[in-house]
């Protein structure tokens, strides 16, 4: 018998050495154990196979039996179907049985409806029966009925409105039962209130009826609790007025009767022109009885609503808020009843809305009323918002306010007395606006107070753009037209185009023309500054922040037209800038006024320069008659300005005196610097460098220049402006008055003192001479050093303190001395 290969391999693996024979017994035991295990497994597999075969045979037998039973039943059904329908067609059987099954389904549904109606009637009867004896049990039965009625509504929607009459009946029963219970509970509370003489002010709840009062209030709250929960989860596009707690309805009932007596009948207190009567009455009711509701009802609200969703709503958990909510319906009804009459009378409508906004603001700020909200930081929209928006009176009111504002603006503009500068309304040392500008600002400030307390951002923005900015634009157009009219009269091209009469030209001569320009400048400057101040006001800052937020989140289809609003407010809206600190609400309007102010200031400068240059022409033509005159008199004697300079000095004195009274220091200095720059250039180029001067002529020239400087510096706010503005002329005449040698006249020393020339000693040269122990420069030493080299000229100018002249200009000036022949 051949040996199994696997057995041979196994033995060779286990018995490799003679020592392995000693483990032969354990190896045999191990093999026997494995053999027994395999036999056991084989036996179990055979048993399982037999059981499976047996189960399969039994299953086949059962299936066969069921198949025979089914065939038997099917044959029996076929026979009965033929007997019943007298037809072998299946369709006929379906129709016959379908009708019967439909009747069965309707019968079952009717039975369920009947059961539901029976349950509803049982709950109604139970609640009605126990209402007088066991009110708490009656309330419990009603709550079950109320929850049943609420649970049917979503089922009705899922069933596509299958049982509208059933739901209507149950709802009708529930409402009637609720009214019955509510009337009974309210009567109990009203009886208690009458015992304490409510609504007598400053009443207290006696301890003897305290428990009955608490029970009556709690029952009413429990009756209403389910409805409050439902209202908490309702989401309406236009939210209804917040619900009034039932205890407060009972408390407010006598107050409402008194309110109707005073403000809906023919009593003297019922006046359309005095809405503050009934508004202040409501506030008085709130002040008079707030202590009572807080002491008597506030603890009950905390106990009843603690841990419920209503605990987050202040009109349920706060007694004062709940009391205000109960007072508002009668006020709402009163306001709506008079709105049709008031809306046709602009003054009454404006007054009513203003009083309503004041009333709303009082409730928000003094009583911290937030309305029905679960967010503590939310703000009650107010009765004003409800009347204007829900009932579409805002457009009418806006029209009325706009007409009032424009009529007042027209009255201001048409009043001749408002076109003059107002020297009394602004502080000393500031630019003076016209009375019209001040009154227009006051008007716009009043308009701000008209809409400051509006809740709607859109309404605020419309007020701002359609009224305030519109009036700003109208006044700007008026100022701009005034400036254009002035230019058409004073400029050559303007006179040619407009054909200005001689009377028109005479009306803008001298200070009259400056007064006209200062009125435009002062008004533009005043309103521009006021707009900048408004841009920092908290109200306008909030409005601007909201406008920026809406502009950034505008998707093109939104109600906010960013481009149009940006054109009236600030272009930073349309630029898409993310920086919230950029821009302001009045940017565009303020910029327009700034441009007008700048242009008017330039016109004032041009007017002064043109007239001053015209006045200097006779002086420039007559200077040759005395500039080269020789005189043995001291130059110190030349202290009187030239006769021909008097017209210039007179014009400067008159113009600058008027400007100093009409303008603030900054614009006055800017204008003066421009005029001085022209005078400096004109005198140097057309007078000094165009004529020759003797010592006496130079001294007279110095006096004339000093007179021009003094015309500016004599005014407060222009200190050292004249000296700096005429620096070239001042240095030029200082150079011209250098003596030609010898003591001659003591004008040299006098000149140095007059122009603050220091008396530092210079190196003595052949052309210098001693004066009072010191040394002064003579004409010849100055000439030598000035023309020697640029470095020598610079050193000389520095020693003499002539910082306004360059080397070439100094040489040109010195050449105008008659003693020098170049």
Image (cartoon, rainbow, N blue to C red):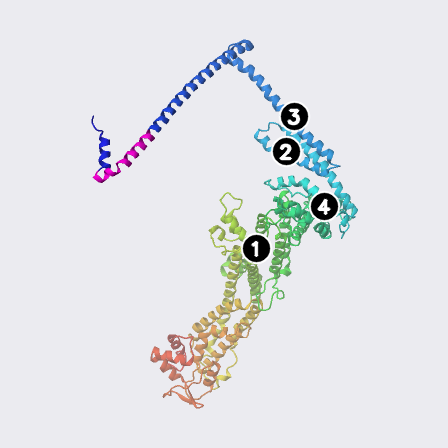
From the image, tell me which residue sits under label 3: 114
Q: N-terminal of the two: label 4 or label 1?
A: 4
Badge 3 vs badge 4, beta-carbon distance below 8 Å: no
Asked whether the viewer can see residue 822, the reply is: no
Q: Nearer the viewer, residue 92 or 601?
A: 92
Badge 2 vs badge 1, beta-carbon distance below 8 Å: no
Magenta: main secondary structure equals: helix
Of tags 2 and 1, the one toward the viewer is 2
Q: N-terminal of the two: label 3 or label 4?
A: 3
Q: Determine the residue positioned at 52% across, 78% down.
A: 641
Asked whether the viewer can see residue 87, the reply is: yes
Question: Residue 18 lies in magenta, yes or no?
Answer: yes
- Mark pair 2, 3: CA separation: 15 Å
Residue 545 located left or right of residue 150: left
Sort mark 3 into few (<14), some (14-19) or many (20+) by Cα contacts within 10 Å. Answer: few
Q: Is residue 528 above or below residue 740?
A: above
Of tags 3 and 1, the one toward the viewer is 3
The numbered disc on residue 148 is 2
Residue 817 % position (x, y): 41, 80
- Mark pair 3, 4: CA separation: 40 Å
């Amino acid at each position: 018998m051949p040996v199994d290969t696997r057995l041979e391999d196994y033995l060779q693996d286990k018995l490799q050495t003679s020592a392995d024979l000693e483990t032969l017994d354990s190896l045999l035991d191990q093999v026997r154990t494995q053999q027994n295990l395999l036999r056991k497994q084989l036996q179990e597999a055979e048993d399982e196979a037999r059981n499976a075969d047996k189960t399969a045979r039994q299953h086949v037998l059962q299936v066969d039996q069921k198949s025979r039973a089914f065939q038997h039943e099917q044959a029996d059904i076929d026979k009965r179907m033929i007997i019943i329908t007298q037809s072998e067609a299946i369709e006929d059987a379906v129709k016959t049985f379908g009708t019967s099954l439909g009747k069965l389904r309707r019968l079952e549904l009717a039975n369920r409806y009947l059961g539901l109606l029976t349950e509803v009637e049982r709950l109604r009867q139970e609640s009605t029966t126990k209402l007088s004896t066991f009110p708490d049990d009656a309330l419990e039965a009603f709550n079950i009925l109320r929850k049943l009625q609420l649970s049917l509504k979503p089922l009705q929607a899922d069933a596509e409105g299958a049982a509208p009459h059933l739901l209507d009946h149950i709802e009708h029963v529930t409402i009637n039962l609720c009214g019955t219970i509510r009337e009974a509970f309210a009567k109990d509370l009203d009886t208690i209130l009458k015992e304490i003489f409510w609504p007598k002010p400053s009443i207290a709840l006696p301890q003897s009826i305290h428990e009955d009062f608490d029970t009556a209030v709690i029952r009413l709250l429990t009756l209403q609790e389910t409805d409050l929960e439902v209202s908490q989860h309702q989401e309406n596009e236009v939210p209804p007025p917040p619900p009034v707690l039932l205890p407060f309805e009972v408390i407010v009932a006598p107050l409402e009767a008194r309110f109707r007596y005073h403000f809906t009948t023919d009593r003297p207190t019922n006046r359309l022109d005095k809405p503050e009567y009934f508004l202040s009455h409501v506030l008085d009711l709130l002040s008079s009885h707030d202590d009572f509701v807080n002491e008597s009802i506030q603890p009950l609200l905390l106990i009843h609503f603690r841990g419920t969703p209503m605990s987050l709503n202040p009109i349920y958990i706060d007694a004062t808020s709940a009391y205000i909510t109960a007072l508002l319906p009668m006020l709402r009804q009163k306001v709506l009843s008079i709105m049709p009459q008031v809306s046709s009378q602009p003054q009454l409508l404006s007054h009513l809305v203003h009083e309503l906004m004041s009333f709303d603001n009082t409730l928000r700020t003094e009583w911290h009323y937030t309305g029905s909200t679960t967010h503590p930081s939310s703000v009650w929209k107010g009765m004003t918002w409800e009347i204007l928006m829900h009932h579409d009176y805002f457009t009418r009111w806006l029209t009325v306010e706009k007409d009032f504002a424009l009529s007042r603006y027209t009255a201001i503009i048409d009043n001749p007395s408002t076109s003059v500068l107002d020297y009394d309304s602004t502080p000393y040392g500031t630019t003076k606006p016209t009375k019209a500008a001040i009154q227009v600002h006051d008007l716009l400030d009043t308009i701000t107070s008209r809409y400051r307390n509006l809740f709607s951002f859109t309404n605020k923005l419309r007020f701002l753009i359609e009224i305030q900015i519109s009036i700003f634009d109208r006044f700007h157009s008026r100022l701009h037209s005034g400036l254009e009219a002035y230019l058409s009269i004073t400029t050559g091209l303007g006179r040619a185009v407009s054909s200005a009469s001689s009377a028109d030209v005479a009306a803008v001569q001298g200070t009259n023309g400056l007064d006209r320009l200062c009125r435009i400048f002062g008004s533009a400057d005043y309103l521009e500054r006021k707009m900048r101040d408004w841009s920092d006001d908290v109200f306008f800052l909030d409005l601007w922040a909201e406008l920026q937020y809406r502009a950034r989140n505008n998707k093109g289809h939104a109600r906010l037209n960013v481009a149009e609003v940006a054109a009236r407010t600030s272009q930073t809206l349309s630029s898409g800038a993310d920086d919230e600190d950029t821009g302001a609400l009045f940017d565009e309007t303020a910029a327009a006024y700034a441009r007008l102010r700048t242009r008017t200031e330039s016109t004032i400068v041009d007017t002064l320069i043109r007239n001053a240059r015209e006045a200097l022409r006779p002086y420039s033509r007559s200077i040759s008659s005395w500039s080269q005159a020789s005189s043995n008199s001291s130059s110190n004697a030349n202290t009187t300005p030239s006769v021909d300079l008097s017209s210039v000095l007179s014009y400067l004195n008159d113009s600058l005196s008027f400007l100093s009274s009409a303008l603030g220091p900054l614009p006055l200095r800017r204008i003066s610097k421009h005029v001085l720059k022209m005078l400096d250039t004109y005198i140097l180029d057309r007078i000094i460098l165009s004529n020759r001067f003797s010592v006496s002529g130079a001294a007279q020239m110095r006096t004339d220049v000093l007179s021009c400087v003094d015309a500016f510096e004599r005014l407060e706010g222009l200190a050292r402006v004249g000296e700096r503005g005429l620096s070239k002329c001042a240095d030029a005449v200082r150079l011209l008055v250098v003596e030609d040698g010898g003591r001659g006249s003591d004008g040299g020393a006098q000149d140095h003192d007059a122009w603050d020339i220091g008396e530092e000693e210079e190196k003595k040269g052949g052309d210098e001479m001693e004066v009072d122990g010191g040394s002064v420069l003579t004409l010849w030493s100055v000439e030598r050093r000035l023309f020697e080299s640029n470095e020598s000229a610079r050193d000389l100018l520095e020693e003499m303190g002539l910082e306004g002249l360059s080397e070439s200009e100094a040489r040109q000036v010195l050449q105008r001395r008659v003693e020098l022949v170049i």
